[in-house]
Image (cartoon, helix red, strand yellow):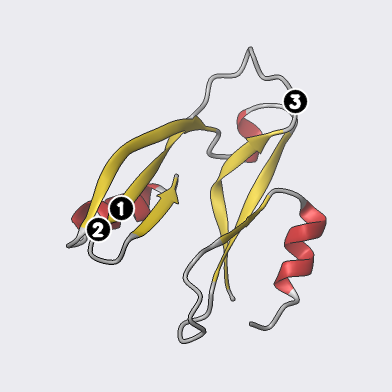
Amino acid sequence: MARRLLLFIVSLAGLAHAQPTGRAIEFHDASRGAYFLTADREEIARFDAAEGWARTGGEFAVYVDAGDAADLAPVCRFRPKAGTGADTPLYIANAEGCDAAKQYPG
């Protein structure tokens, strides 16, 4: 699995005082029946420019960096290795799970 730290952050506690600092955007490729969700600004720009991909209108507020508010945990995204037949990313929102998944060679 290719590894990439996803830029959006999951809240582990109430954050009524902290305003989100970004948006996660959902994309769809109708020809492949594929969906993709990202809060990474560079990925958003690539998907906006990519042929076949369109925004679904699905989006939600996120915290971009761990320092944006108290009690945040990073979310890791693991993308399947090309040629494995798998195409669904795996999202993990705890450090132990991320570390364990990084040890998996596939």
Return the residue at label 2: 30
Point out residue 35 in the picture as x, y percentages from the top left corner: 38, 55
Q: Are marks 2 and 1 in contact (CB under 8 Å)?
A: yes
Q: Please report the residue visible at 37 percent of the width from the left and 47 percent of the height from the top.
A: 41
Q: Are marks 3 and 1 in contact (CB under 8 Å)?
A: no
Residue type at mark 1 is His
Return the residue at label 1: 28
Q: Please report the residue visible at 55 percent of the width from the left and 34 percent of the height from the top.
A: 63
Crowdedness of circle 3 by 10 Å Cα count: few (<14), some, many (20+)?
few
Point out residue 60 in the picture as x, y percentages from the top left corner: 45, 31
Quarter placement of the C terminus: bottom right
Crowdedness of circle 1 by 10 Å Cα count: few (<14), some, many (20+)?
some
Q: Please report the residue visible at 77 percent of the width from the left and 59 percent of the height from the top.
A: 97
Q: Are marks 3 and 2 in contact (CB under 8 Å)?
A: no
State how many labels appear. 3
Q: Secondary structure at mark 3?
A: loop
Point out residue 37 in the picture as x, y percentages from the top left corner: 43, 49
